[in-house]
Amino acid sequence: MDAQAWDARYAERQQWSGEPNALVAELLAGSPPGSAVDLAAGEGRHALWLAGLGWRVTAVDFSATGLARGRERPEAGRVSWVTADVLTWAGPDEPVDLVLVAYLHLPPPDLEDLLLRAVGWLRPGGRLLVLGHDVDNVERGVGGPQEPAILHSVARFGPVAALLDVDRLAQVPRETPAGTALDTVLSGRRR
Ligand SMILES: C[S@@+](CC[C@H](N)C(=O)[O-])C[C@H]1O[C@@H](n2cnc3c(N)ncnc32)[C@H](O)[C@@H]1O
């Protein structure tokens, strides 16, 4: 989907709950606040949650309509909102403590190239956290995009994981009202 299609989707109604994804919250809850980039931030649920914990967050997305919804929230002033295509965005001015990429689905090699660049935006010891729909979700899960080429897998994250001290790389179930969805998570620190 291009930016226009995402704008139209966000214009229809709020897409995601205002709450962070439970696994993102679990994996980041104990981290001391620092600087973060939320890539493909959408309506900013993670950026706003992190900002509430004291993080300095840059939220990047090519949907101005999605970001506008995040900007309406009372705590929005603590987030820097950037309307940009993540594939051409130059990256943060300074190395950051965290790059979060939640439910961004792009074909190869775009996602792979972006994640390799994102590792370069981290300070040594900074964390890359990627979460999204697993390719097995098409056959064995519920919801999410149905094109296997854009979905995540442990194997797809292999090259970027090789650059990190990985604490989590796995297929993980996520309970939804419609049933169990399958996601892939990668969490690791830049060496
Ligand atoms: C499924 S939403 C996820 C939003 C958010 N990360 C979350 O978890 O709530 C995917 C987002 O990716 C954004 N997106 C897709 N391709 C993008 C691109 N090339 N550059 C910037 N944003 C992009 C869309 O606008 C959309 O907001």
Image: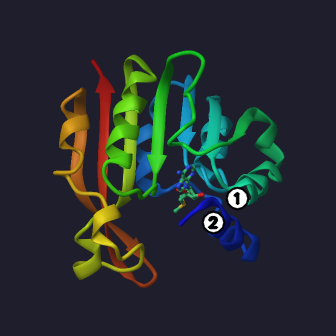
Residue 2, visible in the rendered structure: yes
Name which residue lies at 42% across and 73% down. 144
Residue at mark 1: 66
102 left or right of 124? right
Asked whether mark 2 and ligand 1 are closer than 8 Å, the reply comes as: yes
Q: Residue flagged by tag 1: what amino acid is it?
A: Gly
Q: Residue flagged by tag 2: what amino acid is it?
A: Trp
> Where residue 59 appears, x then y in whole percent?
64, 40
164 left or right of 15? left
Q: Which sits in the foreground, 6 or 58?
A: 6
> Where residue 24 appears, x then y in whole percent?
44, 48
**Disc 2 packing (10 Å; few <14; some 14–19; many ≥20):** some
> Where residue 128 appears, x then y in whole percent?
38, 34
Name which residue lies at 70% across and 58% down. 66
Q: For residue 143, what is the image quadrant?
A: bottom left
Q: Under tag 2, what secondary structure?
A: helix
Q: Under tag 1, what secondary structure?
A: helix
> Where residue 32 appears, x then y in whole percent?
50, 24
**Disc 1 packing (10 Å; few <14; some 14–19; many ≥20):** many
Q: For residue 8, what is the image quadrant?
A: bottom right
Question: Do the numbered discs 2 and 1 sit on residues whose CB atoms are within 8 Å?
Answer: yes
Identity of the residue furthest to the bottom in this view: 178
Residue at mark 2: 6
